[in-house]
Every structure is written in structure tokens, then in C-alpha cells.
Amino acid sequence: MIRAGLQALLSHWRRNPLQLFTLVAGLALATALWSGVQAVNSEARASYDAAAATLGEGRYDQLLPRAGTSLPESRFIDLRRAGWQVGPVLEGELENGLRIIGLDPLTAPGGMGPVTATDDLSLPEILAGGLVFATPKTADRLPPDPGYRVITDPAVAPGTALTDIATAQDLLNEPGRITRLIVSDSQPLNRPPLAEIAPDLIRQPAQAGSDLSRLTDSFHLNLTAFGLLGFAVGIFIVHGATGLAFEQRRGMIRTLRALGMPLTTLIALTVTELLIIALVAGLTGTALGWLVAAGLLPDVSATLEGLYGARIAQGLSLRPEWWLSGLAIAIGGTAIAASGALYGIARMPILAGSRARTAMTTRGLRGLAIASAILLAAALLLALFGTGLAAGFALLGCMLIGAALALPLILRAVLTLAESRAPTALRQWFWADTRAQLSGLSLALMALLLAMAANVGVSTMVSSFRATFTGFLDQRLAADLYIVAEDGDALEAFLAPRDVLIRPVMDTDTRLAGLPAELGGARVSPIYTDNWEFLSETPDLWTRVETGEAVIINEQLSRRAGLAPGDTLAITPDLTLPIAGVFGDYGNPVGQAIIGEDLFRQLHPDIQPTRFGLGTEDPAALREALVNEFGLAPAAITNQAGVKALSMSIFERTFTVTGALNVLTLAVAGFAILMSLLTLATMRLPHLAPVWALGLTRRQLGRLELARAVILAALTALCALPLGLALAWVLLAIINVEAFGWKLPMFLFPLDYARLGLLALAAAALAALWPAIRLSRTPPADLLKVFANER
Amino acid sequence: MRDRTRSTLPPGGNAGQRRPPPWEALSRPPRSALPSPIGPTRRSFLTTLAATTLPLPALAQGFAGMASDAEGFTLPTPNPTFTFPQDHGPHPDFRIEWWYITANMTAPDGTPLGLQWTLFRSALAPTDGTGWNTPQVWFAHAAVTTADSHRTAERFARGGIGQAGVTPDPFNAWIDEWHLSGPDFDNLRLAANGTDFAYDVALVATAPLVFHGEGGYSVKSEQGQASYYYAQPSYDLSGTVTLPSGTIEVTGHAWLDREWSSQPLAENQSGWDWFSLTFDSGEKLMGYVLRHTDGDPWSVGTWIDPDGTATPLENGEFLATPLTTTDVDGREIPTEWHVQTPSYGVNLTVTALNPQAWMDMSVSYWEGPVTVQGSHSGVGYLEMTGYD
């Protein structure tokens, strides 16, 4: 009986291959989007982990020299002999930019980091020096040298070579030097305080997560949000397809029950059937996701590297966590989508009629309205009172689902209104028929709504970020030339007779208001006064900064420490200054405060600026003078246009990724519409036949079908616009602040939205085209049969 | 000796079952120190590296591989002549060497405690020098044991950079801030710190050095594996021990072992059970049994009179039979022994103060204080390797 039952159930798909295709393809697409994004994210995170493990960054406290960039290795021995459990690190770059990290495997708290052991390596070999670990790609960049042997290891962070400290000292030509010490988490009793034995070192506390991952979280957040939305869209499709399949099989199920098949067996069979479908779709989707990820990864890694300096391996590896999660989400998604249908089977009275219910009942509508109202109210409450990142995401979820549920109600109201205003019977019928179709199309339209809203929201966010950042770059890159000069005094003497504005770059890491922060010194000049804009400021700001009477701080510090102009900030234990203004500082993870140059030099006489920004009327002539007369290497001079171009190219990469995901989500939504229309087409013949019989041609009917799809899509697009803007606002003003400490101003991009709207209409028209053509070619006999079969 | 025992270096394993390389430890800070050294999938390369190819005596077969070839390393020869204080210092041309202290102590209220301090030197090549690439590796273990607690710590260092080493005159053996040092070998101060314990004690010798085996040449097997092995079993101890509950004054006596070799164990020797017993009568007994994977054990021992006169025992004179075993993290460890040396009228029950005194280090083994009852009464230390 089980076999016969399963056969009967499966026979439905044999007779409706299109429905099966919809189900499998929808689920596969949803899984593909989700797992593709997951693959990209997990690949990127694995890269950071490798980097963090290599450096011991984030996990351990570090001891750094208070001044200078390195310290003698004897300081390591001094600390160990005093009981401090520390491991030495020498870090530096070769001329070609390759980063070399040297560790002492015996004392480094994390051992040799991520390096994987292999059979032909021994501890003595490593301790003897001469082994360098690097990814195969990085290995190619190591200069050939008989003094060491390169072991390729994919676990090492890209662009980094890991080696024993002795070898690192040789490679970097820093004999007897180390750059920092890693402090083990476990320390013995009776250790003297650091200030007593090493006053020249400063302890930098471990961070909960590395800077890198915190920064890049913003990017991952966007990708994940996209993946999740794409998946949600797919689930709407699956829900539609399973719902339809169960509606159409009500008769079969009733028959099976009547023949004596127990309800539990029936449900078990249905679950089995769904599981098989979910597995097939999940596997297909994961494979597709692989392709999506492989396509996106180069752009994602370029974006991350450009934006945050995070280096990501280019190769994609097949990580079990993401393909398993792909499968799990396919099965979970099917379960969610089909739970309603299963519940329906369980509750269906054996003797109930087999007629499929196609019209949306008033009761169903009321349920939708209530659910939607609850979700939207929750979203409102969360927006008003929620705090924290989790609340931000809950807000996003409530808002999007609530809006999606409200869509059929809104569309229904609009269509009813149009119907009442329709001048002719045909148009009246058109509107009424459209409304009647709503129930069949509503899931696909919700999918379209979400896809469009996501597109509007994310592109608004990215574009706003770009616009803000461009303005920020203009402000920060106000000087015309940027140069690096070892001897700052000589440079200033050389420039003194020329009409040049000089901006020495002076900064140091410190703690402000109890938080890690940067302290900068500014030589007040038009470079600053003409270009810097403030989020809030007080009068005579620059004059007061110049004279050392006030400090300006960035938005991060302002938000984290709750400081505003008028408050005061302790720069050192002995010096407290009033805050004169708050400036935007996008992309910087830490707080920053800027004081006048004289004051800065007074506090940090040991910091000699080596980087300078120069403002001039004639950058080309100044550049020539610096190279030919002052003797600066051309490579030490960067012009502003170059830096800006570089920064902007990073954003173009971001757009490539965002654009690709936009197209993918829209494609999924278009597919949903196509499939809904195709399934509806056969069921609609009984509705259309009478109209045809009244004299409308099949071609006219086809055109009306097309128009219907476009009108519905247009209405949905109109709803999606405000939803998308709300989404963007939540991302910029709530999620961003919670996650990164700064708020991005929101800009509107009407042209982008118009283009997106057209794209959505085109997708809907394209999706409706085939069903419309099919309709216009339906043999008259089929239409006539409708009357013959009339029950 | 820890002669052999120790020599073998801590961990050992049955030849039959391959244990994780003792040197695993080398690659890793003490476990307690690192919540999760690296992901489970990627072990620190050191861990594995150390495991696979360490030339250390510790690795080949047999207990910790002490029977490995001695390429380039000096081998002990019979009839040694020791020169002091130089021989209290390191012998870099031998593979393995240690300075090993165990002590039985009592708190003012009579509570018994034990401490251990061991500095190991392991040569990757038979040369010394200065700089990071010097082929000498140092590591050390420290422990404080009471009836209900056993606290341990471990340190690693390279030779050649000053982080660890031994100088004979004035005597100083150190790794990080741990040290055993003093104007001469009879007057020493011993200190070590862990995350949850510390000790700082003074040692004053009350009898001369004791040379085990044939004048300090100690044979470990019928095939002739041997080490140089002498001891100072008669230090009076006083000082402080710090535990989480506070710092307490302690008194007692300590036993120091010095041993070095290049291949102390035979391949079929799977581990040893080593006893250092101090009787209330002032007599002392050192004895150990080397277990074989095939055949009878090999036993070694020295009887020490109160004035320090030492008499070596023949193979078979020192007998030790397990009476009770205790489950220590899944290992069956004998923690009560029947010890006999009929030629000296010795018939004892030796009981661990704390049966859970497992040294969970890079090279792991059992080591802890014991109490002695029977024909003689007293205290002592027990070390057991090869039970992993």
C-alpha cells in the first residue's frame, strides 16, 4: 500500500512536470543564492582567521614599543626572566610588499599559527631556521635565496610568509630586533608589573574580534542580507508550488484516504516525497551556489582588500559547513513552505469536496491583514525602542515580511477601486479578473516586492556610502601631493620659500575616554579650514584647535563615549580640553581626536612626521622641484588624483558585486512570476472561454494577459519603492550605527529607482510573454471544451 | 635516577601502542594556558612536527625513543671521572640531560606536600653556541602536590639566547624566572611559579653526593644502554609554598638527581617505575624497575646509609609489585606498591599521597609524593612512565 500510495502521489508530478520543475528550480535557486553568499563569506572569514592565527592578533594582548618600530630581542629575554610569558614577533615587509612574520615556535602562545604539519618537517629543522611557510601564490613572490627553503601551505594568510624568528631577522635584515611581543593568556604568579621591568613597552589589549573582521563585517552583513532575501524569495516560490500541488491533489488524497490509507502513512509518504525533492533541489542549488560564489569571489576579495586591506585567498575551497548548510536550508525551507499544506491534509475531512479552492477567502484575507499589522507594529516598536544589532535585524525582518503580507491587500484595494471606475464592461471584467487572479499570483508578487525592495535598499545604501565617502575623500585628501620624507625639517626648510601649504601627518595610538583611539596633530591651514566639514561644531573651531585650547573628535569617539561639543576630553592624565567639533570619519574603526600641531609636538616630542600633504597651485611644478632639487624619489610622491582614483575603483568593485546580486534576486522573482502564470494558465481557461465566446480574439486575450502582468508588477514596484527606502534607512541609520559606530547620511537616487522599476516591469513582461503567447495560440477546440466539461 | 626513568623523558608509552610524541609539548604552551591553541583541524605544525621527526631520544621506539641512534653524540663510557663543579653544568654533546628535584615537605600544621622541579636539556645536534639557531632546546616542569590537589606548570626555551641554561660556578640552572641557584651545589635556592602555585625554598646539603651504578655509570639494560647518574638525596629544605589558599611555610627534605646520556633505554623497554624513599631511620633507598615489552623487568637500585655511603643493588634485588591501581583520566595507574629488597630487610607498602598526580605535560607521566609503611616507615617520591 505504501508503494502504491507513493506511486499515486508521485504520479501527480508526472502529469505536471512544469509544477515539479517550478518546485525544484525555485528551491534550487533559493539555495544557490543563499549558499553562494555563504561560500563567499566563509571563504573570506577563513582568510581572516588564517591571518589572525598567523599574527595572534586579536586573541592575545601584545607588548609594543612606546617609541620607534622595533626593540632589541634582549627585551624578550628580560621579560621571560622576570616571569612574563611572552613570545617574540618580528614583522616587516620585503621590498616587493610581501609581509614576513617571524615567530619563536617554542614561546609563541599560538605556536606557529596556522601552519599545517607535514611529514617531512621536523622541529629541529624549524628551530635550525631556514624554513619559510607561505601559500603557493605567495611563495612565488619570495626572492630566490639558497639561505632558506619555502614550504607551501595553503593555511598561511595570503601575502604573508611565516617563518622562524631567526630566518625573519635574516630576510628582513633586522639582526637582533623584534617588533613586538605576544602575551600568553596564562601568566604565572609573582610577576612584577610591566611598568617596573619594561617601562619602554606599552600593552595593547586583545580585541574581542580582530579589527579586520569587525570592519569587514559590514560588507558580510550586506551579502548575508542579500542571500537571506534571495532565499526568502525562493521560499515564496516553493510555498506557491507546494500549495498548488496539494490543492490539486485534494481529490487524490481524499480517494487514498477513502481506500483505507491511514492518515499517518499518508503524511509520512508526503514528507518522504518532499524530502526527496528537497534533497535533489538542495544538491542542485549548492552546485549552482558554488558557481555563483566562484563568480563573485574575485570581486568580493578585490573589494575587501581595497576597502579594508583584508587579504582573501582567491581560490574557493569546498567547505563542508557551507554545502551542508545549503542542504539544511533547502530542507528547512521546504518544511516551512509545505507545513501549511501538510496541516491541510491532516485536517481535511475525508468526505470534503475535492474542488480546489482558488479564490482567496475573506477569512484568509483577514488573517493576512492581522499578521501584517502585527508585524508592522512590531517593526515600528523596534525602530522606536530597540537597541543592539539583533533588534536592528529583527526590525528588518518584521518590516519586510509585514510589508510582503500586506501586498495582496493593497493590490486588492487598488484593483477594486479601478474596477469601480472602469468605463467599459471589458475593462471592468479585466480588473475583476485580475483581482480574482491575485490569490494565485500573490506569492510571486510578494517575491517580486521583496526582491525589488532589497535592490532599492541595498543600492541606496551602497550609493549613499559612496557619495558620503567621496565627499569625505575630498575633505581628507585636500592636499594636492602626498609625500614621504625621512627628514621632515629639511623638507620644511626646502619648501619654506615656496608658496606651499604643508600638512605634516602626525598621529599616535593612545586611549581616549577609556577606549583605544588615535591622537592626531593638525597644522591648521586652508587645507583643513577650507575643506573639513563637521557634523557639529562650535565657533572659532580651527583657531581654538590651533592655539591648543580645544580638540576635535571623530563621530566614532563621539558616539561611543557619548561626547559632544561642549564636553571635555582628557588627552593625557594632566591635560583636558573642551571639544570644539565632531567630524565624520567613515571607514575608521577606532576613535580619533585631533589637537593643534604645537600641542601635539609638546606631548609627543619623539614623533617626527615623515608623511606630508602639500597644497599648491601647480602640483606638477612642485613635484618636479621635489624630485630634481630636493632629491625625493618619485615613488615617494603620490598625487591626490591617484589616491582618489584608487579609492573610487574600490567602490566600482563593490558595485559589481551588488549589481550581480541585484540581477540574481530579480531573476529569481521573475522566475516566480513566470511559474505562477504558467500554472495558472491552464486553470484559467474556464474563466477565459466565456470572454472568448463573447467575441474577444485569442490575441486580444493574450495582450490583456500581458498587460495584467505588467500592471501588477508596476503596482508592486510602487509598493517596493517606499519599502526599499525604509530598508535603506534601517541599514544606514540603525544597523550601521549599531555595528560600526557611525551613521551614514541617506541620499536618494531616483534614476536608479526608475531603472530598477523598468527592469522589474521588463522581468514581469518577459515572464508573462510565454503564457500570453501560449494563450493566443490555444486551439479554439480547447476553449470550446470548457463548455463541454462544465460541471 | 630517574635514571632511566627520567632519562627517558617524561612520557613514555608502551612500545606496542604508539603514543603521541612526547614532544608534542614542545610545540605547545601548557594546555591550561591555551583555551584552544588552533582549530582542531589544523594542529600547530609544531605539534606534529615535533612528533614526527624529533631526533630527541624521546621519540623513536621504546619508551620515548631513547634507543635511537646516537649520531655524533657522545655515549657514556664505564669508569667515569667527574669533575666538579663543571659536571654540575650542561654537557651539550649528549642528547639529553636533566636537573631533577623532588621534595617531601610538611606545613606547620603537619599537612604533607610534595614538590617537583625538573629542567631538561635536549640537544638537536651535539653542539652549543649562541643565537636563535643553537641546537639546544630546554624545557622544564614544576609541580606542587597535596593529598587533594596536583598543580603543574611547564616552560620551553631555546638555548643560545639566554632564556634558559645552566652555569656550574656559581651554580645557576634557569629557565625564564624559574631557577635553582646558589654559591655552590650544597647551598641552593629553588623557585618556580605557575598560574596557581609557586614555591621558593632553600636547600642545604647534609651529606655527600651519591653515585649510582658503577661510580656514576648506570647501566639500563643487558644491551648496555647507560647514562651518567649521580644524586644529592640529602638536602634539608625550608621555604614557602604558595597555593590559591595562601602562602605557607614549609620544611622537609629534597632529593636532587643529575643524569645525562645519549641513549638511555633499550627498544623493548616500555617504561619504568622509579622510587626514591627516605626512611625515618635516616637510610634511603633508590630503586626502579624498567618494564619490558618482552620478558622480565630490569631493576636497578642503590642503598644509601645515613652517612651517604652508597651500595648499588644487583638486577633483581629491588622488587616492586603493584597492589592497587587508580583510574587517572582513563589510564590504569598503580598507586599502591609492594616494595621489597630482602638483602636489606626491606618489605614495604608504598602509597601515593595523591593518586591523581598525573603530569599532563608535553611529555606526560605520573609523579608524586608517597608514604612508606612496613619494615621501614618514611616518605618518598614515585615516578611512573609509559602508562599512556
Image (cartoon, rainbow, N blue to C red):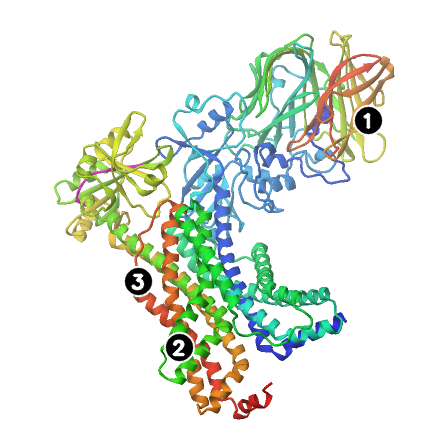
* Residue position marked by numbered label 1 in the rendering: B324
- Identify the chain of the residue marked 2, using the numbered disc in the image: A
Q: Nearer the viewer, residue B49 or B202?
A: B202
Residue type at mark 2 is: Glu
* Residue position marked by numbered label 3 in the rendering: A749
Spatial CA distance of label 1 from label 3 is: 82 Å
Residue A10 horizontal/vertical position (percent): 67, 74
Magenta stretch contains residue A120: no
Residue A337 horizontal/vertical position (percent): 57, 64
Say which residue appears at 75% left-offset and 29% top-offset: B225
Quadrant in the picture for residue B196: top right
What mark, if any, has residue A213 been given in the picture? none
Front of the two marks 2 and 3: 2
| Vertical side of A676 occupied by A734: above or below | above
SS category of the residue bearing label 3: loop
Same chain? Circles 1 and 3: no
Residue B344 visible (yes or no)? yes
Q: Nearer the viewer, residue A789 or B92?
A: A789
Magenta stretch contains residue A525: yes
- Identify the chain of the residue marked 1, using the numbered disc in the image: B
Residue type at mark 3 is: Phe
Residue B320 horizontal/vertical position (percent): 83, 23
Same chain? Circles 2 and 3: yes
Q: Considering only order in the chain, which callout, 3 or 2, is on the residue closer to the N terminus?
A: 2
What span is colored magenta in the figure?
A519-526
Quadrant in the picture for residue B342: top right
Say which residue appears at 46% left-offset and 79% top-offset: A433
SS category of the residue bearing label 2: helix
Q: Which of A252 and B243 is in front in this view?
A: A252
* Residue position marked by numbered label 2 in the rendering: A419
| Vertical side of A288 occupied by A324: above or below | above
Residue A386 horizontal/vertical position (percent): 43, 46
